[in-house]
Image (tube, rainbow, N blue to C red):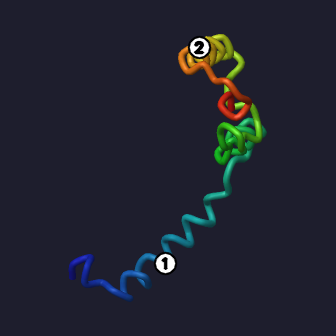
Amino acid sequence: MTKQGWGRNRVLYCLPPNRQNAENSTGPVTAAGRARVSQNATRFGLFSVANFVRPEEHDIFNKFGSGYRAELSPATSLERT
């Protein structure tokens, strides 16, 4: 039988292995692992919860921002955001 013809049988066939896998998937165990995955949903820009620029990249980011502002010459607060 092809995969397209499985229909409901495919759900019944795949469900037990999926449940077994879910039992073994416990997520991060170490503090470093938890800290890393906590950043998975970080948003950028106005909705940023945390700093998204790594400390070692601050100089690069500041140069980028300076060049960007120099080229666009924003006049108002809104334009600067």
Residue 27 x, y percent position in the rendering: 67, 53
Give the structural element (helix, strand or loop) at label 1.
Answer: helix
Residue at 57 percent across and 19 percent down: it is: 68
Q: Amino acid at mark 2?
A: Ala
| On screen, residue 40 above or below 6 | above
In the image, which disc is placed on residue 15?
A: 1
Query: Viewed as shown, does residue 50 lie left or right of 66?
Result: right
Residue at 66 percent across and 48 percent down: it is: 41
Q: Amino acid at mark 1?
A: Leu
Give the residue at mark 2. 70
Residue 70 x, y percent position in the rendering: 59, 13
Residue closer to the observer: 62 or 13: 62
Residue at 44 percent across and 85 percent down: it is: 12
Residue at 21 percent across and 82 percent down: it is: 1
| On screen, residue 79 above or below 58 | below
Q: Which comes sooner in the sequence, label 1 or label 2? A: 1
Q: CA distance from mark 1 to mark 2?
A: 57 Å
Query: Viewed as shown, does residue 48 lie left or right of 67?
Result: right
**Residue reaching furthest front?**
75
Q: Quadrant of residue 8?
A: bottom left
Residue closer to the observer: 50 or 74: 74
Q: Are marks 1 and 2 in contact (CB under 8 Å)?
A: no
Give the structural element (helix, strand or loop) at label 2.
Answer: helix
| On screen, residue 81 above or below 67 | below
